[in-house]
Image (cartoon, rainbow, N blue to C red):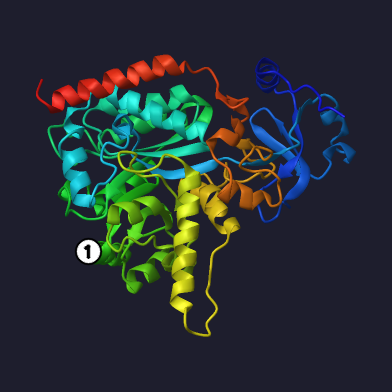
């Protein structure tokens, strides 16, 4: 018996816009909500921007009968329905420079080549192009929420361009604003944060939110962009969270202990990397309830501090971290790579530590890393009540991932397939607050030829400026 003809993009969009119920039915359902069971075959009902219900057979529920009678039905048999991935830290403006330093040797080389040598030459237009490319790539690979750690805010126009790029793509975007490390700039940050919050926080029907960004210490770029009491007070006054990057080693450990003594280490902080920290620093982090964003490929490939993602240290103090992409100048763009890298590294370390003993290795699971890539990332982005799981009442940030392709067939374990088998080519549908951003495997409303031309023009102009031409 053949499957019913799927609705067209126009039919789906019309139903979504009108608030008509939409029933995704028949596929494997992975909720990432401990209170909402996964299903080998199940239904997800959405209306407008929200998830209404999740279950084995919602059409048999008398309380939903009237709603479902008017629903647009989307057959998801042969697919996995899951929450969208959440990227908790990416420097999106750099994306024209993808893989320009694929074999970068350490943090210092990245800092001097990209942040000191190239960042000062970016125009607001370049900021828009790079951020837009990063956001569209995120959507194409199933990332429905991206935190852009925008650390090249040279002028108000640079910040506006980066935020407008998030708005233009329809991603759920978090703009984390920070002044630049090097070069001339207007020194409008952090005072400009008040204007940004008033103009953009909650923009695009609530899809765009703002937060403060800072470094953990003054070692790289001086005290102006290092987190401390003044920035903490500003974030508190603006009622925004703070993302803190370059959290490495002994100096950051000392800073964390100092923040704890000052009363500015709290749940509104997301500490990025957190590599090579002392046990005392981890202890106060756990007690304070901070969130952590791990960048597995960045730590391991670039060689940040110990070069080992700090997953065991985080879990030991009760912190379940989010995951992030970091810098595309040297790293992969997708969440599948982050999940697989962390899964392999942690299990390798656990097994190696127990080798030759009678100890049982404490190994994380594929469900763990999918949790990090969805719900925990949403919590790190201050969006845990909005996205990250297929929970009734949350926004419909949803993936439909084909499980019958050559790399996934036959479907035996939905979570194992999402983490270890799937990639961007298998992502059939991406919804952000119910709005289709990828449909039938293609980004919606995007002219990729025109995008390519714009990206190349921007990249080539940057290269000419670097060369002094």
User: Can residue 269 be seen in the rendering of this structure?
Assistant: no
Q: Residue at (86%, 36%) from the top-left corner?
A: 59
**Residue 447 vertical position relative to residue 248 in the rendered view, above or below:** above
Q: Residue at (22%, 63%) from the top-left corner?
A: 251
**Residue 257 vertical position relative to residue 463 in the rendered view, above or below:** below
Q: Which quarter of the rendering shows the C terminus?
A: top left
In-front residue for pair 120/356:
356
Q: State left or right for residue 452 relative to residue 32.
A: left
Q: State left or right for residue 149 relative to residue 427.
A: left
| x, y percent for residue 326 | 36, 44
| x, y percent for residue 74 | 75, 28
| x, y percent for residue 190 | 25, 39
Quarter of the image for residue 114 reads: top left
Q: Which residue is mark 1?
A: 251
Quarter of the image for residue 435 reads: top right
Q: Which quarter of the rendering shows the N terminus?
A: top right
In-front residue for pair 259/411:
411
Q: Residue at (47%, 62%) from the top-left corner?
A: 319
Question: Of all residues shown, which one is farthest toward the bottom?
Answer: 358
Q: Residue at (44%, 73%) from the top-left corner?
A: 352
Q: Secondary structure at mark 1?
A: helix
User: Can residue 147 be seen in the rendering of this structure?
Assistant: yes
| x, y percent for residue 265 | 35, 60
């Amino acid at each position: 018996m053949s499957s019913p003809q799927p609705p067209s993009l126009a039919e789906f969009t019309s139903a979504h816009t009108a608030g008509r119920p939409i029933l995704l039915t028949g596929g494997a359902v992975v909720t990432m909500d401990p209170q909402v069971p996964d299903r080998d075959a199940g239904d997800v009902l959405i209306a407008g921007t929200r998830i209404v219900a999740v279950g084995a057979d919602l059409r048999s529920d008398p309380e939903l009968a009237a709603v479902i009678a008017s629903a647009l039905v989307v057959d998801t048999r042969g697919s996995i329905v899951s929450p969208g991935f959440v990227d908790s830290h990416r420097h999106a403006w750099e994306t024209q420079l993808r893989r320009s330093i694929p074999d970068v040797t350490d943090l210092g080389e990245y800092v001097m080549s990209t942040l000191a040598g190239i960042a000062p030459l970016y125009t607001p237009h370049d900021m828009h192009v790079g951020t837009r490319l990063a956001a569209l790539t995120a959507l194409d690979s199933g990332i429905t929420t991206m935190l852009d750690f925008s650390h090249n805010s040279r002028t108000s126009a640079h910040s506006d361009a980066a935020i407008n790029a998030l708005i233009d793509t329809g991603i759920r975007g978090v703009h984390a604003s920070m002044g630049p490390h090097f070069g001339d700039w207007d020194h409008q940050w952090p005072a400009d944060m008040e204007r940004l919050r008033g103009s953009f926080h909650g923009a695009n029907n609530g899809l765009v939110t703002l937060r403060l960004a800072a470094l953990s210490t003054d070692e790289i770029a001086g005290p102006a962009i290092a987190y401390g009491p003044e920035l903490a007070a500003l974030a508190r006054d603006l009622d925004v969270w703070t993302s803190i990057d370059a959290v490495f080693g002994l100096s950051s450990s000392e800073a964390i202990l100092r923040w704890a003594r000052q009363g500015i280490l709290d749940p509104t902080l997301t500490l990025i990397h957190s590599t090579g920290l002392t046990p005392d620093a981890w202890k106060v982090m756990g007690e304070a309830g901070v969130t952590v964003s791990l960048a597995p490929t960045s730590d391991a490939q670039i060689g940040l501090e110990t070069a080992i993602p700090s997953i065991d240290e985080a879990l030991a103090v009760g912190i379940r971290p989010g995951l992030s992409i970091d810098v595309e100048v040297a790293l992969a763009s997708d969440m599948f790579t982050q999940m697989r890298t962390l899964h392999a590294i942690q299990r390798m370390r656990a097994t190696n530590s127990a080798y030759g003993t009678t100890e049982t290795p404490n190994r994380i699971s594929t469900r763990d890393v999918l949790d990090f890539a969805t719900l925990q990332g949403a919590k790190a982005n201050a969006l845990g009540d909005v996205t990250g799981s297929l929970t009734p009442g949350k926004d419909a940030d949803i993936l439909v991932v084909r499980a019958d392709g050559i790399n996934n067939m036959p479907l035996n374990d939905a979570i194992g397939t999402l983490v270890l088998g799937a990639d961007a080519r298998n992502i059939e549908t991406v919804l952000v607050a119910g709005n289709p951003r990828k449909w039938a495997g293609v980004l919606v409303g995007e002219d990729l030829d025109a995008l390519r031309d714009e990206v190349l023009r921007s990249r080539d102009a940057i290269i000419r400026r670097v060369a002094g031409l």
